[in-house]
Image: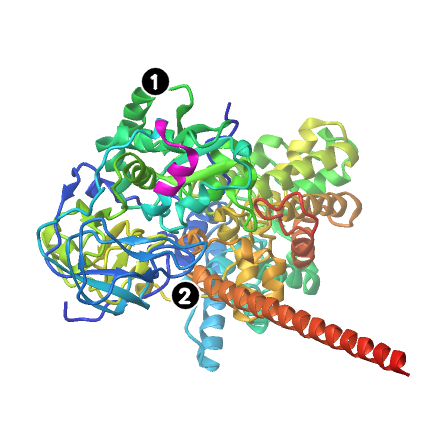
Amino acid sequence: MSTGTGTFAGGVHPYDGKELSKDKPVRKVLPKRDLVYPMAGQHLGAPAKPIVAVGDKVLLGQKIAEPGGFISACIHASVSGTVKAITQHRIPNSGMAQSIIVENDGQYTPAPGVGVKRDYTKMTREEIRNAVKEGGVVGMGGAGFPTHVKITPKDDSKIDYIIANCAECEPYLTSDYRMMLEEPDKLITGLKVLVSLFPNAQGVIAIEDNKPEAIRLLSEKVKGEEKISVRPLKTKYPQGSERQIIYAVTGRKINSSMLPADAGCIVDNCDTLIAVYNAVCESRPLMRRIVTVTGDAVCDPVNLEVRTGTLYSELLEYAGGLNCEPEKIISGGPMMGQALVSTDVPVTKISSALMCMQKDEIAAHPASACIRCGRCVQHCPSRLVPQKMYICAVHGDLDGFEKLNGMECFECGACSYGCPAKIRLTQAFKQTRQAISARRRAAAAAAKAKQAAEEAKKAEAENAAKAGKKDGEVR
Amino acid sequence: MSQLLNVSTNPHVLANVTTKSLMRDVILALLPATIWGVIQFGPYALLLIILSIASCVATEYLWNRGFHKEQTIGDLSAVVTGLLLALNLPSGVPFWMPILGGVFAILVVKCLFGGLGQNFMNPALAARCFLLISFSGIMTQFPQPRFGAASTADGVSSATPLAAIKTAETLGASGQSLKNMFLGLSAGTIGEISALLLILGGIYLIARKVITWDIPVIYIATVAVFVFLFGQHHFDLTYVMMELCGGGLMLGAFFMATDYVTSPITPKGRVIYAIAIGVLTGVFRICGNSAEGVSYAIILGNVLTPLIERVTIPKAFGREGKKK
């Protein structure tokens, strides 16, 4: 039924580095130090609001923060213990965020109700959505979009596809791959839970063809499932980007101002679906994360199951420590990840990897003059002209940048990766896009203020007219 | 960890390709044709090639030195310009000709416009056209290659195959053979005579992803169709093949029309550009005084490039339906 081509135009083929860790089974590790739960930076939207106070006892799986708005998510304790502080703490994106610090009592006493098995087929849609929301589930592919919002479109009947994004196109990452091999039933059940919400939907597990074992295993598991299928995709970065995977699977296209639901699709990452399963079927909120600790600077790359809030610095020892002083440490993969200023930042819901690099290629390659080779145009999955966007960006020409559809850029980094002159295209686009977003917000606020002022004026004039009328009547 | 960590935005890895590696590949791809040129035209041709490259590199070096700019000769682009210029010269020109051409290419066409990436014409071709206009006599004297079938009475210079075909009543009367033109056994500039070696170089560049197939293939096809329909000996396939193998077409198609700086980067723009220079080449060859036209066609195409790009900005992914 699906009409996608299994691939998209553009993209790049960086060294994938997956053989470092792909055959290492996931090892469960427990935190040794205090846990840090940031209110922002682990989901998209408004920061969460703490609902515990310093000194409070918390239990494993207890909700410790509530959503701070419609697009937001709640946060749960991943250990039992005592709230030690609520303070600013550094987070992986290098910023600071209000964080709840919990001292682990080492007991892992679960909160009441956590771990209670539920049969999703006997739950109403309302109950399922609520379970996802109360489980604090967010998109674990990196963006952290709250899943309960994603699975609540305007019209349930218009959703045709739930795509399980198991592409894992980001180099070096093997966490999703390991989960496909180790927890295939949970993944499939999670997908079935979401499919059950939509009368016309079918589930598609989309996997890049560099993971033949996962494709084989999942294809076997979904045999006989009416509404679930496996779709191999061509291996290419950024195949796992939402717009590209929708196109590869269904042939439908969305742009930056559309939601996947506008094309009848909902896309959820592999681990997100397992989180959905845990939240709905086992009453376990999102409080663990699979993290690949890898890179040429770690002695023994591993895949770890880590409790959210654990500090990155703790993870390094499970990978045998560092074999040198790394020049760069990244939260996430090398194409989309964020460079860390310190490893004393917590694992969040959206952490996927801790990558330590002996050498920083970026610093080793200063940018030189653009030779207009056009590789950026060939590589851009959004079919933009990065070469021209860059000229606008360095000249601060926001209008020109918008005219070139620069806001369609999702900063995948393919242009910078392939640039022979090593020009920092993605960096320039990131800054320019932020400037344009800020300008749009300011314009919207100004328009709102103007409208309010005009309304006030109108009301005043009306009042004055009424008063005048009265005067006339008196006369 | 005692030392500070490096921080930058994504991506944190880069492809192996650099400006220098691309230029090196172009030089490698040109080597077979260059060596054949030296075999055919003797050590003086080698001297011309060396002088041309040296002139280009020295000009860029002195420019950067004089204006306290970062030294850029290491990117090898000046070497490519010098090599291409020499390959576009007849082997009998005086030694100062490639020196003058090199200075013109680098100083006037490249550096004055802002250096690498800013020139609006291919420097080597612009210099060749400059020399062709200024010294048309010497620039159109083509010494006979060492190995070749046809030989003229004086044994010193002869018409190029294209010129012979153009003036001949019939194809047979021109005394040219397609085989000689394909293999590089007829008269011409130092680097253009062997279509075979140039095509091999072009295939190497396409296989190494240094250039894409679109511009050379569409350009050659356009010229083929044009001369097939409108040429002196039209509707004759042998004639069409001779037009393709003769003159600077193969050298131009694979090595100069594909010049990054001066060809469009938009997918549609590349098609328009290739067709435009193909038609121009056909017009110049058939209607012009000279039997040649590749150089002028390509530099005119270069000048059109910014305009072509402006009207061929692709529609972004997911925005195809919307106007503007």
Question: Is there any visible trace of residue A11 in the rendered image?
Answer: no
Placement of B1 over or under B44, stated as above or below: below
Q: Which mark is residue A367?
A: 2
Lateral position of residue A460 relative to residue B246, left or right: right
* Residue ranking furthest to the front: A474
The one nearer the camera, A51 or B92, is A51
Q: Which residue is mark 1?
A: A223
For label 2, count other residues whose C-alpha is less than 10 Å away and answer few (under 14), some (14-19) or many (20+).
Answer: some
Lateral position of residue B79 relative to residue A117, left or right: right
Name the residue type under label 1.
Lys
Pointer 1 or 2: first along the chain: 1
Label 1 marks a residue whose chain is A
Q: Quadrant of the N terminus of chain B?
A: bottom left
Task: Please name the residue shown 52% across and 63% down the image.
Answer: A390
Q: Which residues are magenta?
A: A122-131
Alpha carbon separation for disc pair 1 and 2: 51 Å
Lateral position of residue A152 relative to residue A140, left or right: right
